[in-house]
Image (cartoon, helix red, strand yellow):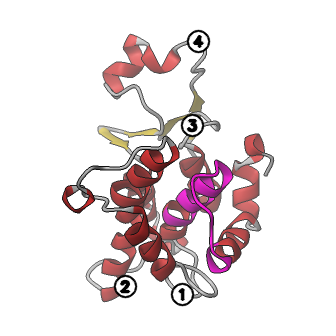
């Protein structure tokens, strides 16, 4: 497996996922300053020129949630995903997909001072509903799926960490405590060295 990444990007979450899994792979750090993410060779793999990008044989997987889901399923013995077909799997999918489809678009726009003129028609809604959703999804103790850490925490918790770090959101005490638990994980600390651990 080849993992194209840069630790100063959203790929820090997939770097973290690999740390949690502790499985062999080739990590290829692209130099954005040198334009390596816009090289013809990389654009042939991912025309968006974005990291993270995972190449596993004939499979090219992009986007943080998709890569984390793929890796959790590829290595089921690591226990980072609930079993397919269970109710827990449905809850897990929500934690994987809400961050990229709802939370990050709203946080990104809000941090720039933009507000959708008709929030009800936007897939991500408005800040009040998004923060209510974050609050309802954040566990009081443990992890997104209970006492077991999973890829859901890498994706959901990782976005909350990123959003707090870059001052996109003001977290509640419950969200802060969850992110503190995330930041205490050895795999998180190993993968986030560029951000000061």
Q: Give the Cα distance between marks 3 and 1.
A: 32 Å
Work out whether 68 lies above or below 77: above
Magenta extent: 156-175
Examine the image and state in which quarter residue 69 appears: bottom left
Is 160 one of the magenta-colored residues?
yes
Q: Tell me the crowding category of disc 1: few under 14, some 14 to 19, or many 20 or more residues within 10 angstroms, Cα based.
A: few
Residue 174 rendering spot, x and y as whole percentages: 64, 80
Secondary structure at numbered mark 3:
strand
Q: Give the Cα distance between marks 2 and 1.
A: 10 Å
Q: Which residue is mark 2?
A: 88
Total count of labels = 4
Residue 23 at least partly seen: no
Left or right, 152 with respect to 62, comes to: right
Task: Name the mark nearer the viewer: 3 or 4.
Answer: 4
Q: Which residue is mark 3?
A: 26
Examine the image and state in which quarter residue 95 appears: bottom left
Q: Which residue is mark 4?
A: 34
Secondary structure at numbered mark 4:
loop
Residue 45 rendering spot, x and y as whole percentages: 34, 26
Q: Are marks 4 and 1 in contact (CB under 8 Å)?
A: no
First in residue order: circle 2 vs circle 1 = 2
Residue 22 vs residue 144, the one in the foreground: 144
Please identify the residue farthest to the front as the structure is shown: 117
Q: Are marks 2 and 4 in contact (CB under 8 Å)?
A: no
Q: Give the Cα distance between marks 2 and 4.
A: 43 Å
Task: Name the mark nearer the viewer: 3 or 1.
Answer: 1
Identify the residue at image location x=64%, y=36%: 8
The secondary structure that dominates the magenta segment is helix
């Amino acid at each position: 497996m080849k993992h194209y990444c840069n630790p100063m990007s959203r790929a820090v979450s997939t770097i973290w996922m690999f740390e949690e899994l502790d499985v062999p792979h080739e990590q290829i750090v692209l130099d954005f300053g040198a334009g390596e993410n816009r090289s013809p060779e990389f654009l042939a793999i991912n025309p968006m020129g974005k990291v993270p990008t995972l190449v596993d044989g004939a499979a090219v997987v992009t986007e943080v949630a998709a890569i984390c889901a793929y890796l959790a399923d590829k290595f089921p013995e690591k226990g980072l995903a609930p079993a397919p077909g269970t109710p827990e799997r449905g809850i897990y999918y929500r934690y994987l997909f809400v961050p990229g489809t709802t939370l990050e678009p709203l946080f990104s726009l809000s941090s720039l001072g933009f507000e959708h003129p008709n929030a009800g028609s936007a897939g991500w809604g408005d800040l009040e509903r998004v923060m209510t959703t974050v609050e309802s999804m954040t566990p009081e103790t443990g992890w997104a799926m209970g006492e077991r850490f999973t890829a859901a925490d890498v994706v959901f918790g990782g976005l909350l960490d990123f959003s707090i770090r870059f001052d996109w959101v003001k977290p509640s005490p419950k969200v802060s405590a969850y992110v503190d638990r995330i930041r205490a994980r050895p795999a998180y600390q190993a993968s986030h060295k560029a951000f000061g651990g």
